[in-house]
Image: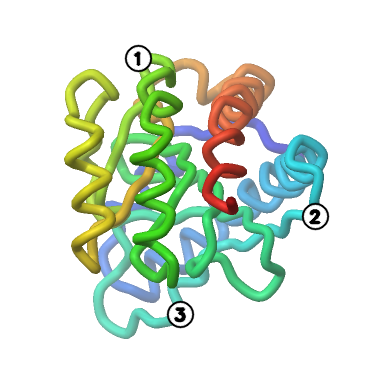
Amino acid sequence: MTFKGFKKHDFDTFNIEGLDERMSAIRERIQPKFKVIGDELTGDLSAMIGSEMFLHIAKHARRSVNAPNDTWLAIAANKRGYKKHPHFQIGLFDSHVFIWLAFIYELPNKSDIAKIFLDNIEMINDVPNDFVISQDHMKKEAYTIKEIEIEKSLERFRDVKKVEFLIGRHISSTDPILKDETKFMDYVKETFETLIPLYLLSYK
């Protein structure tokens, strides 16, 4: 399969009622695209970071009742899993595509990473203005670098167990870039390239 962009049909997946029915659509419509995108990006990130990265596609295996409101791929330095490690994500809600460098609550050294970021907060302040930050990967909402108080966000990330730190970009489901696979992939790679210094900093 070749990746030909994301279309309305993909976003409509999240309007399908029922766990089994929605998961079937995710597997048929979205996951094959994730595999193509992820294979390319995993190679690129491995080259840019200088160490091997591994692709993970969300299985939503823990769900037994409620259908997922979003789905994603993750790329991490660990072959067995990604949630306990800093990782890159691309995923879909019904309203947008998200492109994240993600530090989620399963990280065992979350507070240490927060302290490193607080000590190097200028690196986050220097990220382009169209980048956004979220503190909960399960919510759609995110805030631009200029809207959010980054220092307070990092302090909450450090001090509150369930608070996360995700930084990246959103693309509206109606944005034409999603229908142009070359432009979309270039945009994702540019986003990740901007975030790699933060990723590397988190490992110091």
Instruction: Report, in whole angstroms, how far the alpha carbon at label 2 lies from the one at label 1.
Output: 30 Å
Question: Contact, CB < 8 Å: mark 2 with mark 1?
Answer: no
Residue type for callout 1: Asn
**Could you say where residue 111 lies in the image, as x and y percent from the top left?**
35, 60
User: Mark 1 = which residue?
Assistant: 129
Instruction: Report, in whole angstroms, how far the alpha carbon at label 3 lies from the one at label 2.
Output: 26 Å
Q: Quick check: 145 left or right of 166?
A: left
Q: Secondary structure at mark 1?
A: loop
Answer few, some or many: residues within 10 Å of disc 3's Cα (few below 14, many 20 plus, some between 14 and 19): few
Q: Quick check: 54 left or right of 24?
A: right
Residue closer to the observer: 85 or 89: 85
Q: Secondary structure at mark 2?
A: loop
Answer few, some or many: residues within 10 Å of disc 1's Cα (few below 14, many 20 plus, some between 14 and 19): few
User: Mark 2 = which residue?
Assistant: 52
Quarter of the figure with residue 122: top left
User: Mark 3 = which residue?
Assistant: 61
Instruction: Answer whether residue 64 is visible to the viewer in this image.
Output: yes
Answer few, some or many: residues within 10 Å of disc 2's Cα (few below 14, many 20 plus, some between 14 and 19): some
